[in-house]
């Protein structure tokens, strides 16, 4: 079943370790049918924190696909429930999904009002590289103006398992670097990552950019 990009959104919630299951539980109460939790780590490029060993924090990243009409409720309910308007309590961003196959279980009949900005101010860059190279991606992005990133370890339940991410097979040894930034910086950051990581060469990685229709808890 193919559906147009007005029907669905991808919501991504980044929180401290141990909170992801609570996020899913609250989201289900407002109509989200389910989601996937990835483990990752946030990076803060601060010299003093690095010296103290406090520059990385364990994160859980929750991916949820839902009906477009749930976009505002997801942001509003989760922001209030988990105090995401306060620093270091987490962030939420949502992106339009252009194509969804075989997701008949997702609810789209909510009567809640939908909203969001027609002009999207932010974009999210996903870069998939060999495990151990995520920090190099972060360094390249930071040099071009990005202020931080989340590195996701894409691991299956067994050594020969594969994770699925946007219908792509992600081998256990891969890392996904997720960077949210003002769209004015996107081209410069992508060029910096490409130049540093040689993404355009076969086998070096994958990089793609998605629009962000709404953010909560994001500190510039």
Image (cartoon, grey):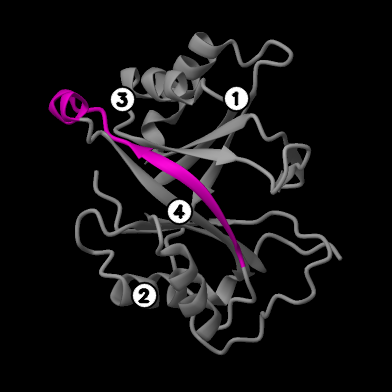
Residue, x 42% and y 61% (percent of image)? 117
Residue, x 19% and y 28% (percent of image)? 46
> What residue does disc 3 label?
145
Residue 120 seen in render: no
N-terminal of the pair, mark 4 or mark 1, is: 4
Residue 3 seen in render: yes
Residue extending furthest toward the bottom:
111
Q: Is residue 75 above or below residue 194?
A: below
N-terminal of the pair, mark 3 or mark 1, is: 1
Say whether marks 4 and 1 touch (CB < 8 Å).
Answer: no
> What residue does disc 1 label?
129
The answer to which of 159 and 180 lies nearer the viewer is: 159
Q: Is residue 140 above or below residue 152?
A: above
Residue 63 is inside the magenta segment = no
Is residue 102 shown left or right of residue 21?
A: right
Residue 177, image x, y percentages: 50, 34
Looking at the rendering, the stretch of residues picked out in magenta corresponds to: 35-52
Q: Is residue 24 above or below residue 54?
A: below
Tell me the CA gap for discs 3 and 2.
29 Å
Q: Is residue 126 above or below residue 109?
A: above
> What residue does disc 4 label?
60
Is residue 159 shown left or right of residue 67?
A: right
The answer to which of 60 and 84 lies nearer the viewer is: 60
Q: Secondary structure at mark 1?
A: strand
Tell me the CA gap for discs 2 and 1.
34 Å
Q: Secondary structure at mark 4?
A: strand
Label 2, residues with CA under 10 Å away: few <14, some 14-19, many ≥20: few
Residue 53, image x, y percentages: 23, 30
């Amino acid at each position: 079943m193919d559906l147009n990009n007005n029907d669905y959104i991808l919501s991504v919630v980044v929180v401290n370790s141990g909170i992801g299951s609570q996020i899913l539980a609250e989201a289900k109460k407002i109509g989200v049918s389910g989601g996937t939790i990835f483990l990752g780590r946030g990076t803060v490029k601060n010299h003093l924190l690095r010296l103290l060993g406090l520059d990385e924090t364990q994160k859980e990243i929750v991916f949820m696909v839902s009906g477009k009409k749930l976009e505002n409720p997801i942001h509003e309910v989760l922001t209030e429930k988990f105090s995401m308007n306060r620093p270091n309590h987490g962030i939420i961003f949502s992106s339009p999904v252009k194509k969804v196959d075989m997701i008949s279980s997702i609810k789209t009949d909510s009567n809640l009002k939908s909203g969001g900005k027609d002009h999207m101010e932010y974009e999210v860059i996903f870069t998939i590289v060999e495990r151990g190279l995520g920090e190099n991606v972060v360094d390249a992005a930071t040099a071009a103006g990005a202020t931080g990133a989340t590195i996701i370890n894409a691991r299956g339940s067994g050594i020969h398992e594969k994770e699925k991410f946007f219908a792509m097979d992600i081998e256990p040894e891969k890392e996904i670097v997720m960077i949210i930034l003002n769209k004015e910086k996107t081209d410069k950051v992508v060029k910096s990552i490409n130049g540093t990581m040689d993404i355009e060469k076969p086998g070096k990685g994958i990089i793609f950019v998605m629009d962000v229709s709404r953010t909560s808890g994001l500190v510039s």
